[in-house]
Every structure is written in structure tokens, then in C-alpha cells.
Amino acid sequence: MANTTHPDMIEATCADGHISYYNKHDVCGPHGIVWRKAQAEASGANDTLLLPCEHPGCQHKTSIIVDCRGYR
């Protein structure tokens, strides 16, 4: 699961160790530009997001599970 530094922010680390930050309003919203797969869990609905690394020149993508309820 991704670490968060603020309720609206997602922190993800790519395979090369680069840390990127994403706003849930951007990646969870209906017009988000990332792949997502909703999954039902006992604790609620989560989404699996495939987020691109934001480090210049890095081509890695990181798959993380995020609670996107309220942002869709």
C-alpha cells in the first residue's frame, strides 16, 4: 500500500528507488490518466493504480492500491 503524506496525496517508489507524489484528485478522478482496477475488499473498495515514475527519464510504472472513495 502506498504511503501518504497528506490525505489527498499518494507517495509511490519505483523500481529504481525514485519517489513520486500524486494528488488523488488527479489520479483517482474520472478523467485520471492512469490504469485502474476497482476491487472489493472487506474494508471497502480500493483501486489498483499503475502510476508512472515522475523522475526525468525514468520509464518505470508502479502498481499501488489506493482508497479512491470520494475522489471518483
Image: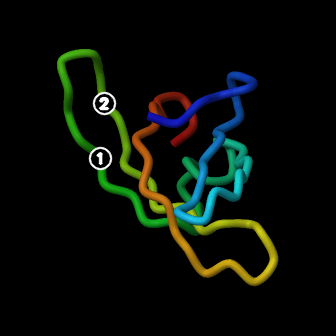
Residue identifier under label 2: 45
Q: Indicate which disc, 1 or 2, sits on the residue closer to the N terminus.
A: 1
Image quadrant in which you'd find residue 54 = bottom right
Q: Position of residue 44 (x, y in %)?
A: 29, 21
For the N terminus, give its image quadrant.
Answer: top left
Three-letter amino acid code at disc 1? Ala
Q: Nearer the viewer, residue 71 or 49?
A: 49
**Mark 1 nearby-residue class (10 Å; few <14, some 14–19, many ≥20):** some
Which numbered circle lies on residue 38?
1
Apparent side of residue 65 relative to residue 22 in the rendered image (left or right)? left
Residue 7: quarter of image: top right
| Whether label 1 touches label 2, CB < 8 Å | yes
Residue plotted at (57% across, 37% down): 71
Q: In this view, does 63 lie above or below 64?
A: below
Q: Is residue 42 above or below residue 68?
A: above
Across and down, in percent, residue 35 comes to 43, 66
Secondary structure beneath dot 1 equals strand
Residue at 59 percent across and 30 percent down: it is 3
Residue 65 pos. (x, y %): 40, 41
| Residue toward you, 58 or 39 | 58
Q: Position of residue 6 (x, y in %)?
A: 75, 24
Local packing at callout 2 (Cα closer than 10 Å; few below 14, some 14-19, many 20+) is few
Q: Which colour scheme is used?
A: rainbow
